Image (cartoon, rainbow, N blue to C red):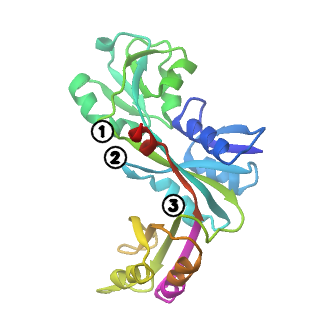
Amino acid sequence: MRLAFLGPVGTYGEQAAQRLAALEGLEAVAFVPQQGIRAVIRALADGDCDLAVVPVENSVEGGVTSCLDALWEHPDLAVARALVLPIRHALVGTGPLDAISEVLSHPQALAQCSLWLGEHLPQALQLPTSSTAEAARLVRGSRFRGAIASLEAAAEHGLEVLAHPINDVPGNCTRFLLLRRGERSHRGPHASLAFSLHSNQPGALLESLGCFARQGLNMSRIESRPSKREMGEYIFFVDLELPEGAEPLDGAIADLSPLCEHLALFGAYPLTNLAAEERAD
């Protein structure tokens, strides 16, 4: 069993992949790091891997647009399970904190620590990388470069922890999806779908959302993305909380379909919230 994740070794994506594999009861899993989210999904779509784990939403910075776009573009992929992982960023490196003039990390991590950086390293140049673990690898051996990464990445690359935690919001967390090829389930406590409407006219979106309300389905998220075809045309991504059984979801999809130019159900699936469990403890 080969599972693709956003690499290299030491990313939060690897942590999520290991957790999700355990939740699925998978054994003898080969974790295969990829360079970029689209590469993760392509490895699954092309059959190079059996499963893939991708970040879809952060509690501070919102949706991961490259993941949303890729799901829309690959109707052969399905969401099998979701995991909410607490994120605790650290500033890591090999030089002292007051010598850091460049900070490297994934753009989402830089944004999630912007207030801390503005207070403690206001003059430091912020440089984006493909992942937090890649940033940790790149700063190894430099006295003027630091990386925003996990404690696991610091240990993997032999770096010192200069400050921890440094994320601006203590409850920072990211939702990851476990993807597979094949049929998309209609049964589960959560579901994700996306749709585009036939026309852009007053009340069109309200009418479409009424399909969920009439079935008593609660939306836990709604987000729009440009269709990339013309200005003002959007795709709406929706997450739903479902009761037991497939009937309410099927009913909502049946009501919604005539209003849509395109409609894609990514799947119904279980969700494990480690951030909520952490707060409860």
The disc labelled 3 sits on which kind of residue?
Asp
User: CA gap, disc 3 to disc 2?
Assistant: 20 Å
Q: Of discs 3 and 2, which sits in the foreground?
A: 2
Which residue position is annotated with label 2?
Answer: 60
Sequence-first tag of 3 and 2: 2
- Contact (CB < 8 A) between labels 1 and 2? yes
Q: Which amino acid does label 1 sit on?
A: Val
Residue 266 placement: quadrant:
bottom right
**Residue 33 location in percent, x, y?**
65, 37
**Image quarter of the N terminus:** top right
Span colored in magenta: 254-267
Q: Name the residue under label 1.
A: 169
Q: Looking at the image, tell me whether mark 1 or mark 2 is earlier in sequence order.
A: 2
Q: How crowded is mark 1: few (under 14 residues within 10 Å), some or many (20 or more)?
A: some
Q: Upstream in the sequence, badge 3 or badge 1? A: 3
Whether residue 70 appears in magenta in the rendering, the answer is: no
Amino acid beneath label 2: Val
- x, y (%) of residue 98? 28, 12
